[in-house]
Image (spheres, rainbow, N blue to C red):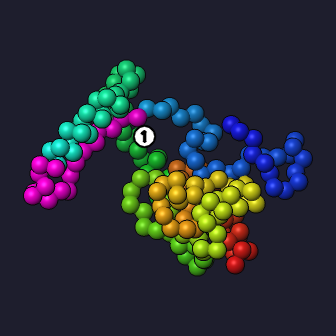
Amino acid sequence: MPQVRLSRRIPESQAKPPLSTRLEDAQTPVLDLRVSNPTVTGLAPRLSEFKTQMRSALEYASDAYLTLSNFAQATLPSLLIHKKEIQTPVVERIQENLKYLLSSSAHSAISVLPVEGAWYAIIALPPIHTDLEWATKILEEEEVRVHPGFLFDIHSEGMLVLSLLTRPDQFHEGISRILQLVERAL
């Protein structure tokens, strides 16, 4: 992991890594086991030819680039049997973090965009900085990692993307720090 320059003068022996909103930085080892099945749905009947072509393209991409490893193939039956045990804690964590984000930002200058599934939340900060400037400021001043919106192809300024998979205690602390920084900036 690259070294992070801390903006405050803290003796290196006392420096702590920044709070993270990224799954990659979780303390628990995470096995990268990706299993997916792309589908094409929701297209109007008059677009059936396009739908057929799109399905064909997705099947090609899946076969050529998204093949399952031998390990994933061997593990998949067991994962499907235990999917509730795996999914339940993840869903509970996402819901807990989202509930905290919504309640703590309710009377602040931060807006939370509707969550459309997945495990990310998008927040809109006052447009006094770009999303990259906000993300950098939050990292340097509050030691909290967030993703600037442009990394997710969001073209509005002041948009940040947060992972809802972060441990709740870290997530709560990170949100508190972000809210304090925004309050000071206004």
Residue 92: x %, y % from top left:
46, 53
Q: Residue furthest left?
A: 46
The residue at the point 24 percent across, 36 percent down is 59
Percent x, y of residue 51: 17, 49
Residue to which mark 1 is pinned:
86
Q: Which residues are magenta?
A: 34-50
In depth, the one of 43 and 96 nearer the eye is 43
Q: Position of residue 186 (x, y in %)?
A: 70, 78
Q: Is residue 108 left or right of residue 69?
A: right
**Is residue 37 in the magenta section?**
yes
- Which secondary structure, mark 1? helix
Res 132 quadrant in image: bottom right
Which residue lies at the image location 74% right of the left edge and 74% below the top edge?
Answer: 184
Q: Is residue 138 above or below residue 55?
A: below
Q: Amino acid at mark 1?
A: Ile
Q: Is residue 117 left or right of residue 52?
A: right
